Image (cartoon, grey):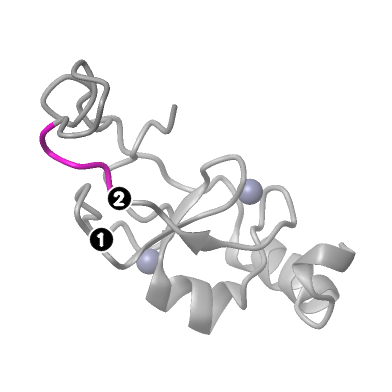
Amino acid sequence: MLEVKPNCELCDRDLPPASKEAMICSYECTYCSDCVETTLHNVCPTCGGGFTMRPIRPVRAEGGQANLGLSNRPAGTQRYHTKWSREQIDAVVSRLKNVPPEKR
Ligand SMILES: [Zn+2]
Ligand SMILES: [Zn+2]
């Protein structure tokens, strides 16, 4: 289950559960779409993978399973900040940005 982290790990902007700007890698490293496009170029600095839009968890559980939804499985509140320096990020990005994620 996704933690649904509350912020971009690079620019620290808020990414609430309903945000359409939240992007995640397969490990749920979480960044805003601006940082993914302009700084990361679809390269996660931690794992080297690509990003996809974070699915929006519904507020209420209106599917078949009644104990889901944000009301039962709230979004995470712990804020994360990338441990990589800008130089480290740029090095990984320049190495991988021209390799499509499925070839990394
Ligand atoms: Zn950002
Ligand atoms: Zn990652």
Q: Quadrant of the N terminus?
A: top left
In the image, residue 94 lies at what x, y percent?
78, 78
Q: Is residue 71 left or right of residue 49?
A: left
Magenta-drawn segment: 56-60
Main secondary structure along the magenta-highlighted residues? loop
In the image, residue 9 lies at what x, y percent?
42, 52
Q: Residue at x 51, y 80 (%)?
A: 37
Q: CA separation, marks 2 and 1?
A: 5 Å
Find disc 2 in the rendering and name its residue: 7
Q: Residue furthest top?
A: 67
Whether the residues at callouts 2 and 1 have beta carbons within 8 Å, the answer is yes
Q: Quadrant of the C terminus?
A: bottom right
> Which secondary structure lies at badge 1?
loop
Q: Residue at x 66, y 57 (%)?
A: 45
> Which secondary structure lies at badge 2?
loop
Q: Is 35 rendered above or below residue 58?
A: below
Q: Is mark 1 within 8 Å of ligand 1?
A: yes
Amino acid on which disc 1 is placed: Arg
Q: Residue at x 62, y 78 (%)?
A: 41
Of callouts 2 and 1, which one flags the residue occurring earlier in the amino acid sequence? 2
Find disc 1 in the rendering and name its residue: 13
